[in-house]
């Protein structure tokens, strides 16, 4: 079984689907983990959420964790905090309402988002949107907002001790290339971040390569994963 992971799609439906096609992703036989931030910024939050929700509910090898952008929407709807308004809430809401237009569909979407875990593990990897504090506590929602410098203050051995020797796969903070430091695999390439050179990566863990969509060039390349250093923008 091939293993794929993607994060920080941010409403990039067309680009996501092109990556799935490029990698010949087959949900019947492949594993896919989506580690949050499916929405906001890009034009197609609704279609991305609908496709990922469909895959998650249809195929047992598709797993999804929540990101801080989904959390922001839930906060806003629950009258907890209006931070979502700063991150393209109207465009995302319009896309969601247009896509989930049948009675009860939006409510069903919100309930699905509320059930998403903050972390998922398989036999080799731990998947979490932004990483986590050590010791890990699954009730600490602040982990969804964890800064890269805070995650990387831990030594590689501290991470591996916490995960039982598994590699931690995370997104959240845009970097220039998918990078592995021996304990952490960072995969957010800044999709829909206009001040950067935006890219979106579908990482094929079994081959340890990244299928990368370049928004500026509108091309997909397959690249080996960088090892041993942390790439910053």
Image (cartoon, rainbow, N blue to C red):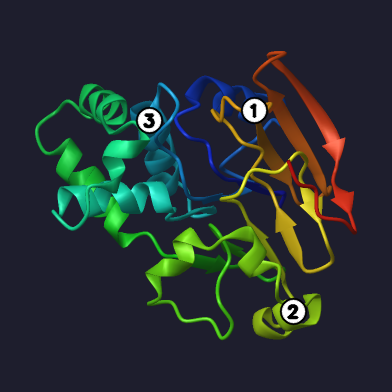
Give the Cα distance between marks 1 and 2: 30 Å
- The image shows residue 192 at horizontal and vertical percentages of 54, 28
Residue that sits furthest to the top in the current view: 217
Residue at 14 percent across and 28 percent down: it is: 102
Using the image, determine if residue 225 lies above or below residue 230: above
- The image shows residue 173 at horizontal and vertical percentages of 60, 49
Seen from the viewer's position, the closer of residues 13 and 171 is 171
Q: Is residue 19 left or right of residue 128?
A: right
Using the image, determine if residue 184 lies above or below residue 87: below
Seen from the viewer's position, the closer of residues 49 and 137 is 137
- The image shows residue 219 at horizontal and vertical percentages of 73, 16
* Dots 1, 3 in contact, CB < 8 A: no
* Dots 1, 2 in contact, CB < 8 A: no
Which structural element holds mark 2? Answer: helix
Seen from the viewer's position, the closer of residues 207 and 98 is 98
* Residue on which disc 3 sits: 45
Residue at 27 percent across and 30 percent down: it is: 96
Q: Earlier in the sequence, mark 2 or mark 3?
A: 3
Residue at 15 percent across and 54 percent down: it is: 78
Q: Is residue 115 left or right of residue 51?
A: left
* Residue on which disc 2 sits: 160
Packing grade of label 1 (10 A; few <14, some 14-19, many >=20) is many
Q: Earlier in the sequence, mark 1 or mark 3?
A: 3
Q: Quadrant of residue 196?
A: top right
Give the Cα distance between marks 1 and 3: 17 Å
Name the front one of labels 1 and 3: 1
Which structural element holds mark 1? Answer: loop
Residue 198 is marked as 1
- The image shows residue 14 at horizontal and vertical percentages of 52, 20
Q: Is residue 193 left or right of residue 105?
A: right
């Amino acid at each position: 079984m091939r293993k794929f992971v993607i994060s920080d799609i941010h409403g990039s439906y067309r680009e996501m689907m092109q990556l799935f096609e490029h990698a010949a992703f087959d949900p019947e036989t492949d594993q896919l983990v989506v580690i949050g931030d499916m929405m906001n910024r890009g034009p197609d939050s609704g279609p991305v959420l609908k496709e990922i929700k469909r895959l998650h509910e249809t195929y047992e090898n598709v797993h999804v964790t929540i990101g801080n952008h989904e959390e922001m929407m839930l906060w806003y709807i629950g009258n907890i905090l209006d931070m979502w308004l700063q991150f393209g809430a109207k465009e995302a809401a319009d896309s969601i309402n247009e896509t989930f237009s049948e009675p009860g569909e939006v409510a069903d979407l919100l309930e699905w988002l509320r059930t998403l875990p903050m972390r998922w593990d398989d036999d080799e990897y731990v998947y979490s949107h932004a990483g986590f504090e050590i010791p890990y506590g699954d009730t600490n929602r602040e982990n969804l907002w964890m800064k890269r410098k805070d995650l990387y203050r831990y030594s590689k051995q501290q991470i591996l001790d916490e995960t039982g020797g598994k590699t931690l796969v995370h997104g959240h903070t845009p970097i220039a290339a998918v990078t592995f430091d021996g304990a952490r695999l960072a995969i957010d390439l800044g999709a829909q971040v206009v001040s950067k050179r935006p890219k979106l990566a579908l990482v094929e863990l079994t081959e340890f390569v990244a299928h990368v969509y370049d928004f500026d060039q509108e091309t997909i390349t397959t690249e080996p994963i960088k090892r041993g250093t942390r790439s910053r923008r």
